[in-house]
Image (cartoon, rainbow, N blue to C red):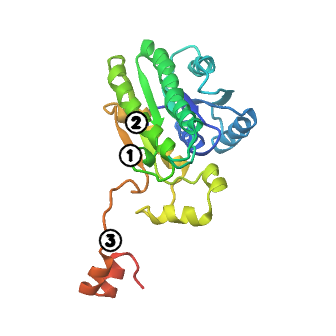
């Protein structure tokens, strides 16, 4: 996949999707710096990565992406004596709340982290890349960036903004051969979801996913590897849904009508429910 030896920075790389992206890049031979706010989480992640990928060039640095000086320092570390090749701008979060009740802090938190923090990472990654022949920047959005997620307006709004940021950056940075794309995951099995949502809620997410299961963080990492490599060298300004089909717009379900016309046996077979 032609990422061997490339220098990569993964924000929010200590857990979840960020960890899966770092793992896949390391498996393909990239040198990866993971960053996040907690040194203990990052330390455990690097240990796991080196166990999963023997000989992996994985390192860590504490970095809050809303603090510009910390972003500059992290990119300098990841670039080493050359330029940065890959940025996976994964760090982000949400803040639940109905529009009628959500505090100003909910909007400020989501926009500052998901949009402004990511924009800061893009800015300084691009400054490193542009003098070294270009690179690949991948932002991590969500199906919530294009579909309404009820009672999560600050999160969905900020992810929609992130996708527009991605497109704007793709156009502005194209003259420097810097490609900028976004990945919009659906339900991915992460620590954050497991800790904060009920089994019933998570089962509902699976039910709304046509492929009938949750995704693994490493499956988002597979898309990152593609976009980071020469395999994706003609791709920029795109939002890739890696979601098991969750983002497909679906209307009414006419199962009942079809059962009346074709019978239960035929419909069960068509739905993969063969006896």
Determine the CA span between mark 3 and mark 1: 22 Å
Residue 177 is situated, as x and y percent measured from the top left of the image, at 36, 21
Task: Say above or below: 176 vs 139.
Answer: above
How crowded pointer 3 is (Cα within 10 Å; few <14, some 14-19, many 20+) is rated as: few
Sequence order check: which comes first, mark 2 or mark 3?
2
Q: Give the labeled residue for mark 2.
A: 163
Q: Please state, as top left, top right, bottom left or bottom right, where the C terminus lies in the image.
A: bottom left
Could you tell me which residue is drawn at 64 percent across and 27 percent down?
A: 64
Location of residue 252 (image quadrant) = bottom left
Relative vertical location of residue 273 with respect to residue 23 in this rendering, above or below: below
Separation of residues labelled 2 and 1 (CA atoms): 9 Å
Residue 130 sits above or below residue 226 on the image: above
- Image mark for residue 253: 3
- Which percent across, then down, holds residue 127? 47, 15
Q: CA distance from mark 2 to mark 3?
A: 30 Å
Q: Secondary structure at mark 2?
A: helix
At mark 1, the secondary structure is loop
Residue sitting nearer the eye, 252 or 88:
252
CB atoms at circles 2 and 1 under 8 Å apart? yes
Question: Which residue in the protein does label 1 denote?
Answer: 146
Task: Determine the residue located farthest toward the right in the rendered image.
Answer: 40
Q: Position of residue 46 (x, y in %)?
A: 69, 37
Q: Judge the density around disc 2: few (<14), some (14-19), many (≥20) Cα neighbours within 10 Å.
A: many
């Amino acid at each position: 996949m032609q990422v061997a030896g490339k220098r990569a920075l993964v924000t929010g790389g200590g857990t979840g999707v960020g960890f899966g992206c770092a793992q896949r890049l390391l498996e393909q031979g990239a040198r990866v710096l993971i960053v996040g706010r907690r040194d203990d989480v990052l330390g455990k992640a690097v240990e796991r990565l080196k166990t999963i990928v023997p000989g992996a060039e994985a390192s860590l640095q504490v970095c809050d992406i809303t603090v510009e000086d910390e972003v500059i320092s992290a990119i300098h570390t990841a670039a080493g004596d050359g330029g940065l090749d890959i940025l996976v701008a994964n760090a982000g979060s949400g803040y639940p709340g109905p529009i009628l009740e959500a505090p100003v802090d909910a909007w400020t938190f989501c926009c500052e982290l998901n949009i402004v923090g990511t924009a800061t990472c893009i800015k300084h990654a691009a400054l490193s890349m542009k003098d070294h022949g270009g690179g690949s920047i991948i932002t991590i959005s969500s199906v919530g960036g294009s579909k309404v997620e009820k009672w999560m307006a600050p999160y969905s709004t900020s992810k929609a903004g992130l996708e527009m940021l991605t497109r704007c950056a793709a156009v502005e940075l194209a003259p420097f051969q810097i490609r900028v794309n976004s990945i919009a995951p659906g339900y991915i099995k992460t620590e954050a979801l497991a800790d904060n949502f009920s089994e019933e809620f998570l089962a509902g997410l699976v039910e709304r996913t046509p492929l009938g299961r949750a995704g693994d963080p490493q499956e988002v990492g597979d898309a990152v590897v593609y976009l980071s490599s020469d395999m994706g060298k003609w791709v920029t300004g795109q939002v890739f849904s890696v979601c098991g089909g969750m983002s497909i717009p679906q209307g009414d379900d006419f199962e009942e009508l079809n059962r009346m016309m074709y019978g239960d046996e035929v419909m069960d077979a068509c739905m993969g429910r063969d006896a």
